[in-house]
């Protein structure tokens, strides 16, 4: 018995020593590749894991563990995230620092955007949070300790009402950006190419006196080698009918006087989600409408639904859903925090419309009708118009 107790004690001591040693086991690296992102945990579904957010390349990361295809990264003393291994590259020249100081802030605008520029000693990871009522953008900078003694704010900033910060934790600096308008029109966060200055770019509200002034992008879901769902009786492919509806929407918008529309695809083309995202970022639309057709394992499920990821973009999706329900479709709902790739960009409001269910016979019959495509396009147009009217 004594021998067994001694063995158990030795094992306990070994495990405790290993646990104490674990925090010191890490290596340093930088984010790399197209659209690196952080996830909250290791859970996955068909849309991937729940994303904390996208970050810039060359951001310094402290890697503390490896789990399957992900690295666990330590953002600050009490905050961790997971990143795909393809998104982090080891850099042996980097060394962990006990603290990173923030320096002065500068808030100003140019002809198109407002900016908050924050000088840091190193490119640190960050997370952005949209808030409404009041309309604000919160940016948490992990690993940063304030040495900011002034924030210069110029009148050239038109959309930014005020900027201030608070040290939420010893090594988490929260920047609060108050906005002039209730509607979030988009933001982009990145580091300058020559140093470690964090730049938060805020999009100003465009001219909303008329829908004609807006730059509207349309994405026809799937395409090429990605067929999507198929009809329960007709076996038509989702990719073909999302394109038909998207083209009708473009035609309807132009008839309403919209001067600038952009289609991610006009034919049966294979496009990856990063490719679509890149072309949309280059196009810089005022809003994006993604067209999809739904499907379920149970053929009794039917209805229309809209989707968004960020709370500041929800009003567009709810305005469109309200008009879609006027077609007599059942309500499948308004879905938030949707982890779809094209719902991920923060640069412009976006809404995904699941028009109806190809797996439901009644819905499928409607989807097959060109007259229904025109009605759908008209209702989406009305939804956008009502969304604009609500801001005036």
Image (tube, rainbow, N blue to C red):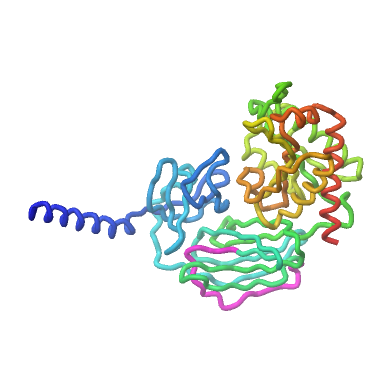
Q: Is residue 367 left or right of residue 69?
A: right
- Residue 282 in sight here: no
Look at 83% across and 38% down and name the residue there: 376
Q: Which residues are magenta?
A: 139-158
Front one among 72 and 194: 72
Front one among 238 and 125: 238
Residue 256 is inside the magenta segment: no
Look at 67% across and 56% down and name the residue there: 311
Residue furthest top as drawn: 234
Q: Is residue 243 left or right of residue 140?
A: right
Q: Is residue 139 left or right of residue 293?
A: left
x, y (%) of residue 8? 16, 54
Residue furthest bottom as drawn: 149
Query: Residue 374 appears in which quarter of the rendering?
Result: top right
Look at 51% across and 55% down and name the residue there: 59
x, y (%) of residue 54? 57, 51
x, y (%) of residue 288? 74, 46
Look at 75% across and 37% down and name the residue there: 355
- Residue 302 in sight here: yes
- In the image, residue 149 sits, relative to residue 318, either above or below, namely below
Residue 141 is inside the magenta segment: yes
Front one among 180 and 291: 291
Front one among 374 and 20: 374
């Amino acid at each position: 018995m004594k021998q067994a107790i001694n063995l158990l004690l030795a094992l306990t001591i070994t495990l405790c020593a290993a646990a104490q040693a674990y925090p010191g086991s890490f290596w340093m690296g930088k984010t790399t590749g197209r659209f690196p992102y952080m996830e909250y945990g290791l859970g996955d579904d068909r849309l991937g894991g729940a994303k904390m957010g996208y970050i810039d390349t060359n951001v310094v990361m402290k890697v503390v563990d490896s789990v399957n295809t992900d690295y666990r990264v330590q953002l600050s003393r009490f905050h961790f995230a997971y990143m795909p291994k393809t998104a982090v590259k080891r850099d042996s020249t980097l060394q962990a620092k006990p603290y990173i100081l923030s320096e002065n802030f500068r808030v100003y605008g140019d002809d198109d955007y407002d900016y908050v520029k924050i000088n840091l000693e190193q490119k640190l990871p960050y997370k952005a949070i949209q808030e409404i009522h009041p309309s604000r953008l919160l940016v948490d900078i992990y690993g940063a300790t304030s040495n900011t003694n002034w924030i210069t704010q110029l009148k050239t900033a038109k959309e930014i009402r005020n900027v201030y910060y608070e040290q939420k934790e010893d090594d988490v600096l929260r920047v609060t950006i108050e906005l002039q308008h209730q509607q979030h029109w988009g933001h982009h966060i990145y580091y300058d190419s020559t140093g470690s200055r964090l730049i938060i770019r805020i999009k100003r509200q465009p001219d909303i006196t008329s829908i004609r002034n807006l730059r509207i992008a349309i994405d026809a879901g799937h395409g090429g080698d990605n067929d999507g769902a198929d009809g329960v009786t007709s076996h038509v492919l989702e990719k073909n009918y999302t394109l038909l509806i998207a083209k009708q929407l473009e035609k309807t918008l132009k008839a309403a006087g919209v001067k600038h529309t952009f289609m991610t695809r006009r034919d049966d083309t294979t496009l990856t989600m990063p490719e679509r995202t890149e072309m949309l970022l280059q196009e810089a639309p005022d809003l994006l409408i993604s067209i999809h057709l739904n499907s379920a394992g149970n053929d009794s499920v039917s209805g229309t639904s809209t989707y968004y990821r960020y709370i500041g973009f929800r009003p567009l999706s709810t305005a469109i859903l309200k008009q879609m329900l006027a077609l007599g479709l059942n309500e499948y709902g308004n879905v938030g925090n949707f982890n779809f790739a094209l719902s991920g960009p923060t640069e412009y409001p976006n809404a995904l419309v699941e028009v109806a269910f190809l797996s439901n016979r009644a819905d499928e019959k409607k989807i097959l009708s060109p007259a229904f495509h025109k009605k759908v396009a008209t209702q989406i147009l009305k939804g956008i118009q009502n969304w604009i009217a609500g801001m005036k």
